[in-house]
Image (cartoon, grey):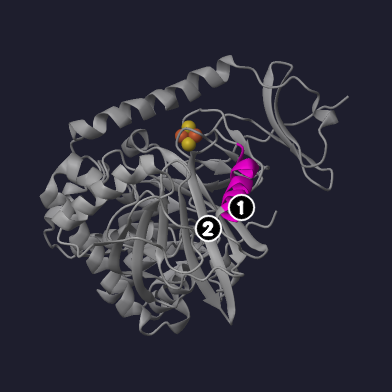
Amino acid sequence: MDTTSVWRATAPGPGFEPLQGDVPCDVLVVGAGITGLTTALLLAEQGRKVVLLEAGEIGSGTTGHSTGNLYVTTSQGLSSIASAWGEPVALEVVRRRAAAIDFIELQCRRIPRAAFTRCGHYQSARFAQDQDRIHKEREALSRAGCAVRMEDSLPGGLPPPSGSVLVLPDQAQFQPQAYVRELAARAARAGASLHEHSRVLELDAKARRAVTGAGSVSAGEIVLATHSPKGVHGVHAEMPVHREYAVAFEAGGVDPGPGIFWWQGDESLSIRMHEHEGRRYLVVVGPQHKVGTHNAKAALMAVEAMARSYLDPGPALHHWSAQNYRSHDGLPYIGRDRSGVLVATGFGTDGLTWGTVAAQGIAALLAGQDDPFIERCSPGRFTPAKGARALLEENATTARALVQDYLTRGQQEHLSSLAPGDSAIVESEGEAFAAWRAPDGELFAVSPVCTHMGCKVHWNSVETSWDCPCHGSRFRPDGTVIEGPALAPLQRRQLTLG
Ligand code: FES
């Protein structure tokens, strides 16, 4: 299945050459999503010599697979932040996220294809039991100074909600891939050296040095804008990793106009419209699933079926999914880790706005400015008691994945009988194999042991990848790293088939 998002399909752009040779710089930024590119642009504009390394292409991580929605609240609800951290922090979250949206709006004035639009953010419930959440959110947003209102219905073509609709005005949406492509061009014009297809294979935080396949970078500072920090890192134990699945339909008769529409509850959906060259798309994103513990194809099909049961869209044109790392206490991790490297992670599904907040915070920090909010977001911060329970539960899941996966043996079928498109984890002669047969018949076999911290990977049938349930590393069938904290590929296995 083609898993190119509607954003990546409709915003092509020129590429950047891979890194060659050994390069010194002031700041190395790893990752060319919205966080890395905003950071690179701001630092290059400060006059610093910046090198940016991207394992894939501009926006090919989560940014190009996001919703393109910008809002001052968070997907877990501002009420959860107010509850864990107190109302002054919830107020600061709104203030910082609003400032980030203003920043993006300012940049977009010169990027017409980013299609930045101010719009309302609508939260409603499909079922009566989910109304409570809507009212809690209304209260938290009101206390944080937001001009929210309640309405009885949703705009054109959207089905009637159960109860009232919470409307938060003056939020925004845009085309995220078009935006980051332009940020890349501007960062390059400001003097930054950008390199795509330049995966970091080794990272020496102490020596501030990163090695790729064809070069290396020595830097005064390193910023890991990789969605999840590379290598073994304390915050990995604190961040549940989820995937969500998206479908872009031909809009058909559905036309609510600009707006961010969230249906809260068990069957949660996020809905928005997008228009490109006269074609109208209905973008629908479904609930979150823990990485490596679900059937990806079934999850994607469920989103399509849910959308069709509530709405009346045309054919499905694009399918994709995205991974997110959620902090346990509602705030992102921004700042220096113990090794002195700067990290930006834990954004949950709110990364377009948090990524911009993080880039602004890191640029200010490197300019020597004090910022109490960014200090509060430090990766080494104290865990509020109210977030600790979720953290303990999450760690229990990870521990189960580490231990149980080695006790539960995989299927014992013969690899030679795998049909094209099928995968299996197989024990053969005392060795474990994660095998997948490509549609053309070629059989790929790798070790199922994740090279990050040793969990066992699971097959993702939508994106033909091996996904690790513990901290979200993902690998191609040949073992190459796609994303996540793992630096090394899964070990290739030699097969002797009878
Ligand atoms: Fe950490 Fe796999 S991502 S063990």
Residue 481 lies, in percent from the top left, at 56, 45
Query: Which quadrant, please, contains the C terminus?
Result: top right
Discs 2, 1 touching: Cβ within 8 Å: yes
Q: Tell how many labels.
A: 2
Residue 19, horizontal then vertical, whole percent: 51, 63
What is the CA distance from the residue labelled 2 to the residue labelled 1?
Answer: 8 Å
User: Which residue is drawn at the image coordinates 14% and 54% (left, top)?
Assistant: 143
Q: Which residues are magenta?
A: 295-309
Q: Which of the 4 image quadrants contains residue 282?
A: bottom right
Q: Which mark is residue 304?
A: 1
Helix, strand or loop at disc 1? helix
Tag of residue 284: 2
Is 209 magenta? The answer is: no
Q: Position of residue 348 (x, y in %)?
A: 37, 48
* Residue drawn 55% across the image and 57% down it: 214
Dot 2 amino acid type:
Val
Secondary structure, magenta segment, majority class: helix
List the single residue furthest toward the right. 498
